[in-house]
Image (spheres, rainbow, N blue to C red):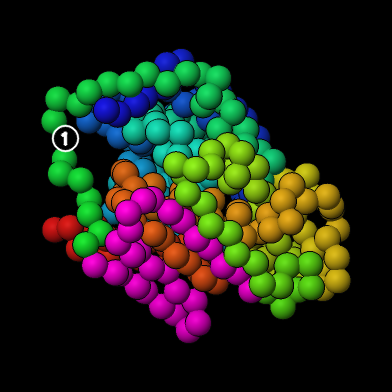
Amino acid sequence: MKNTLKHPFERSGVGLHSGETVRVRVLPASEGEGRYFVRVDLPEAPAIPATVNAVYQTTLSTELRQDGATVRTVEHLLAALAASGIDRARIEIDGGEVPLLDGSAKEWTEAIARSGIVPFTPTQEEPPLKIESPITLQEGDAFVSAIPSSQLRFTYGIDFDYAPIGNQWYSWTPDIESFGDAIAPARTFGFADQIEQLRQLGLIKGGTLDNALVCDREKWLNPPLRFANEPARHKLLDLVGDLSLLGTFPQAHYLAYKASHQLHVQLAKAIRAANH
């Protein structure tokens, strides 16, 4: 059984990197369409599939591209859709970046729940992706793994040389804890001493203390946190969003440490390759 949305919903807000206000409308989709974006602001409204083959670049967010049209920072909305069980959705967007909202997936997840979910039985189903032996990718001491498991599970570890964060871990099992409670509220985070450098590179133009947690070497600049280990949970949220580009989550234990969007996407590609 698969699911789509019962009713459309709409949200608008500022893009993290572009700083531009963008409107997003999420609608039910037809069979076989999966999850995909439509750039309604561009001539002929090109569609961009939310699939791993469409990944264009992964600098501080995940960006998709199809036939020259792009959409950036897709991971929070896609995580909310996939973790809510929405297999197909048409996402109309009037700009090049999904709005950050409060920096988490909380508003997306709540909007999906309010819109309602409609189950459907596909007339044709692709064979399910399987993890039959461990897959690991490593860059220095950062790594991502998919390990055969009796249940779906995600575990994330981070380690930063900033006292408010340090070493954190979180493990989430969808069958035991709801995404809406445990993962969706965790916000993106950044470091006060990196803001100017990133802005000079044309990044985080829309980042503020209202949509991102920010710390210096000693303290958080905008407490309180929603969880003691909110940064680790947010990285897990990003992992869920990036792996959603597979279309489904093959049953496995996904384990990541100090990883990046690039490593997440490389793992998704490796899983896809191992199933062909």
Q: Quadrant of residue 181?
A: top right
Q: In this view, does 117 lie above or below 66?
A: above
Residue placed at 22% from the left, 23% from the top?
A: 121
The residue that appears at 43% across and 31% down in the rendered structure is 91
Q: Can residue 38 be seen in this view?
A: no
Residue under pointer 1: 125
Is residue 17 a member of the stretch shown in magenta?
no
The image shows residue 3 at horizontal and vertical percentages of: 34, 26
Left or right of 203: which side holds 78? left
- Any part of residue 123 in sight: yes
User: Where is the C terminus found, in terms of image quarters?
Assistant: bottom left
- Front residue of 128/102: it is 128
- Where residue 129 sits in the image (x, y, percent)? 22, 51
Decide: is 69 above or below 195: above
**Residue at x 54%, y 42% (from the top left corner):** 177
Residue 189 or 230: which is nearer the viewer? 230
Q: Is 149 inside the magenta-drawn segment? A: yes
Could you tell me which residue is drawn at 44 percent across and 80 percent down? 139
Residue 254 picture quarter: bottom left
Task: Tell me the crowding category of disc 1: few under 14, some 14 to 19, or many 20 or more residues within 10 angstroms, Cα based.
Answer: few
The picture quadrant where one finds residue 127 is top left
At numbered mark 1, what does the secondary structure look like: helix, strand or loop?
loop
Q: What stretch is highlighted in magenta?
A: 133-159
Between residues 168 and 208, which one lies in front from this camera angle? Answer: 168
Q: In the current view of this chain or complex, which residue is farthest to the top?
A: 7
